[in-house]
Image: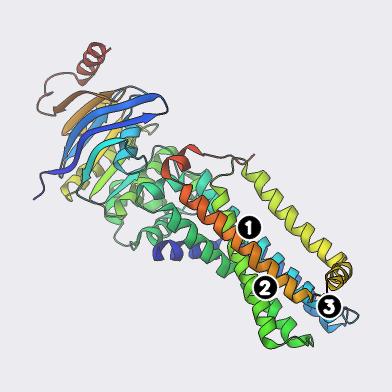
Amino acid sequence: MNNVKKASFNYMLKSKGNIITILTMLVLYILVCVGIYAGVFKTKSEQEMALIMYILILGITLLIANSLVLDLTVKDKLSNRIEFFLAANIKIKDLILAYSEQMLKMASFVPFMVFMTFYYFIDFEYSFMQIVILYMTTVALSYSEVLFLNTYTFYAQKNKLFKNVIIFGTFLIIYLSGMFSKELIALVEQFGLDIIYVIIGFNLILSSVLYLVSRKKIKDLNNELLIKQRGQWE
Amino acid sequence: MIQNMIEIEKISKSFGSRTLFEDFSLDIKNNSIHAIIGPNGSGKTTLLRMLTGLYEIDGGRIKSNGSHAMLLENDYLYEEKSGLENLKLFGLYFGYKAQDYERYSDLLNLTGELDKRVSTYSKGMKRKLSLLVVIMMNRDIIYLDEATSGVDPISRVEIRKIISQLKNDGKTVIITSHDLSEVEKIAEQITMIKEGDLVFNLSHKEIEGKSLEDIFIKAGERNE
């Protein structure tokens, strides 16, 4: 499993497509930093800023992770490399877990910088523990989503459609959350809740569901099914 | 020393309602070159897939006394990377260092091409690079599924040379092929299967002086 981890990280690190995606997200991060410095978010409440930070961390992680899944897992599947790996005794479960772990590692760099920037430059009244729990549960959700994406790649027949749904869905969530952050917070407050607890609860529930579904799907995968499930790009 | 590297005992395999293998048995000797031949759809690739664990058998037993790797019929290289980068990357997956490969890449006449991108390679060069990766994995058993299919005559000779070298290095090589003249030149043991049935299992000595093509056609007709 360590060999697969080493190899996949090395592959992702040298892939031009992945480097471009990470650099694009880095530019987005710099724009956010400039926005904070220029006082663009001055009118935003503490809750709104927590929501924006959350959406940025999750959204950036997902966009990078999706690019990594396409570049590594989908290509492995479509090029028959998976069959070669399996025939040499690499287990599909080990491969999916190793890929997911390495992808999360690579996709978490920019989001971690977003988190640190917000933590240091936004005057949150939330306690240190509350912010850390928010971040940790977001990482847990990110991992479950990466695991789910990697697992589902082996079931999906139309991989391009699968990619488009993920990218479009992520952008939509980022856009809608940014546009309607005020309304969203007002809605949550109507129930006497703080947005940070809602986010933590959402993270815990969704990450558990995605993790359990992924593990069940991984358990159901066998070599024969993987060879038959060729998949296509178009 | 182990006599048989692989022992296949009464295995069976069905796909839905279609039974392909039933009570199929075969021994593959240690440090030998064993060819499996048969017409299209005879079950050669399925047999290799069962031997490598890609397919689960429905019944019977397969005893393998060594580690294995398999050269697939279709290409699976990283097209956008160079030959050497492919060698190194697969090395990370399988825990070998991309060193001392020249001994084999020279035999395959590939050393001078390793800096080029795989997408510029011919089919023969891709097969040879895939074979080089499998060799570098240093497994006891090497399965070669249609290793010379669609490959130019010069590359075929080079692949034959390297298979002989692998035997000299103590490996057990199992090849499938449509090309009977190719098999005749290299295999020590030849097994013909048809729709999952064993048609014949002959040593190279037993077919010496005879035409494998004639044996193949007659045996095929008898089995119909």
Residue matched to label 3:
A35
Q: Where the C terminus of chain A falls, by quadrant?
A: top right
Category of crowding for the residue at label 2, using alpha-carbon neighbours closer than 10 angstroms: few (below 14), some (14–19), many (at least 20): many
In the rendered structure, the answer to whether residue A171 lies left or right of residue A87 reads: right
Toward which corner of the image does residue B87 lie, by quadrant? Answer: bottom left
Residue at 60%, 53% in the rendered image:
A70
Query: Alpha carbon of mark 2 to alpha carbon of mark 3: how far?
Result: 16 Å
Residue matched to label 1:
A67
Q: Secondary structure at mark 2?
A: helix
What chain does mark 3 sit on? A
Query: Alpha carbon of mark 1 to alpha carbon of mark 3: how far?
Result: 26 Å
Type of the residue with mark 3: Gly
What chain does mark 2 sit on? A
Q: On residue A111, which mark appears?
A: 2
Pick whichever, A201 or B133, lies toward us.
Answer: A201
Query: Alpha carbon of mark 2 to alpha carbon of mark 1: how far?
Result: 15 Å
Q: Secondary structure at mark 3?
A: helix
Looking at the picture, does residue B221 appear above or below residue B50? above
